[in-house]
């Protein structure tokens, strides 16, 4: 496995998708958001390493930049809906649009003024999009919980056409994927060989046993109470 380091020019911050111009050396995957990007899809953000700088005035972010591997500097958006919050050595950038909330958390743990991305997330706050036949196109899984609803016993991925693929059962036990339940949500966590994590959160708002993906990200798991609140408005569609 090649190391995921500076060379991944195709990966850039999710938050720049809608608010900045595309860096001149991005590749075909440049606009791929963490959303539904598949296994490991969000790790590109972390792959930049300590490449982010911020200017703080009175404890607030007034400017930010990303230094590309070739030395060029890309200005990070500080308007257009992106909101920065500073907490200790962490800076969180949040972009809220009509159908999703994207967040990146930067950290400068060693205090050298350069930040890396330690977590990313996005929450789908709208009802799933449907295809021409009216079926949901959002990822959905059929989940069996144990008798106390405290643990996940079985999971299968269900397509709108009725196809099912077993992801977890007595016979199918993936070694790099953990399933858990919390706040009534089902959480799938993949751990890569390098120790980084990618997670997805599912909610069964209409209690039909099929959980719809409502959030995904990398690094520390998102606050699940917040995910519940952010998806309550469309709970019947999940
Ligand atoms: Ca640093
Ligand atoms: Ca459901």
Image (cartoon, grey):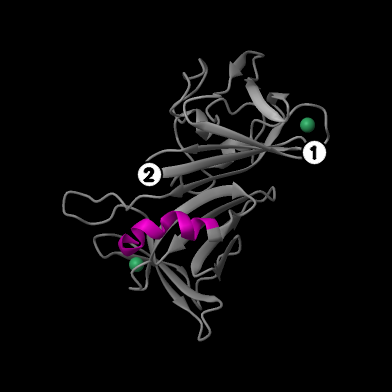
The residue drawn where x is 65% and y is 52% is 220
71 above or below 149? Answer: above
Q: Position of residue 165 (x, y in %)?
A: 38, 65
Classify the position of the C terminus by image quarter. bottom left
User: In this view, which residue lies farthest toward the bottom?
Assistant: 147
Q: Is 17 covered by the magenta stretch? A: no
> Is 207 in front, or is 193?
207
Determine the residue positioned at 56% across, 78% down.
150
Question: Any mark on residue 99, and which?
Answer: 2
Q: Using the image, determine if residue 131 lies above or below residue 183.
A: above
Label 1, on which residue?
109
User: Is label 2 in a helix, a strand or a loop?
Assistant: loop
Q: Is residue 152 rendered to the left or right of residue 176?
A: left
Is disc 1 surrounded by few (<14), some (14 to 19) or many (20+) residues within 10 Å? Answer: few
Give the overall secondary structure of the magenta segment. Answer: helix
Quadrant of the displayed image that contains ligand 1? top right
* Secondary structure found at label 1: loop
Q: Which residues are magenta?
A: 226-238
On whether ligand 1 comes within 8 Å of the CB at mark 1, the answer is: yes
């Amino acid at each position: 496995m090649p190391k995921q380091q500076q060379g991944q020019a195709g990966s850039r911050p999710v938050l720049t998708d809608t608010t900045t111009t595309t860096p001149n050396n991005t590749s075909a995957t440049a606009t791929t958001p963490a959303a539904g990007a598949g296994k490991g899809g969000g790790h590109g953000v972390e792959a930049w390493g300590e490449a982010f700088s911020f200017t703080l005035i009175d404890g607030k972010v007034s400017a930010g930049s990303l230094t590309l591997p070739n030395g060029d500097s890309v200005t990070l958006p500080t308007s257009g809906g992106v909101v920065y919050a500073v907490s200790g050595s962490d800076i969180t950038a949040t972009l809220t649009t009509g159908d999703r909330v994207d967040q990146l958390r930067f950290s400068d743990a060693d205090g050298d003024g350069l930040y890396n991305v330690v977590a990313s997330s996005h929450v789908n706050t709208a009802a799933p999009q449907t295809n021409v036949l009216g079926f949901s196109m959002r990822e959905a899984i059929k989940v069996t919980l144990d008798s106390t609803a405290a643990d996940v016993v079985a999971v299968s991925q269900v397509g709108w056409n009725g196809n099912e693929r077993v992801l977890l059962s007595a016979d199918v036990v993936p070694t790099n994927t953990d399933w858990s339940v919390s706040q009534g949500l089902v959480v799938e966590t993949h751990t890569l060989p390098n120790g980084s994590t990618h997670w997805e959160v599912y909610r069964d708002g209409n209690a039909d046993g099929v959980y719809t993906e409502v959030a995904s990200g990398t690094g520390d798991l998102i606050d699940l109470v917040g995910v519940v609140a952010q998806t309550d408005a469309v709970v019947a569609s999940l």
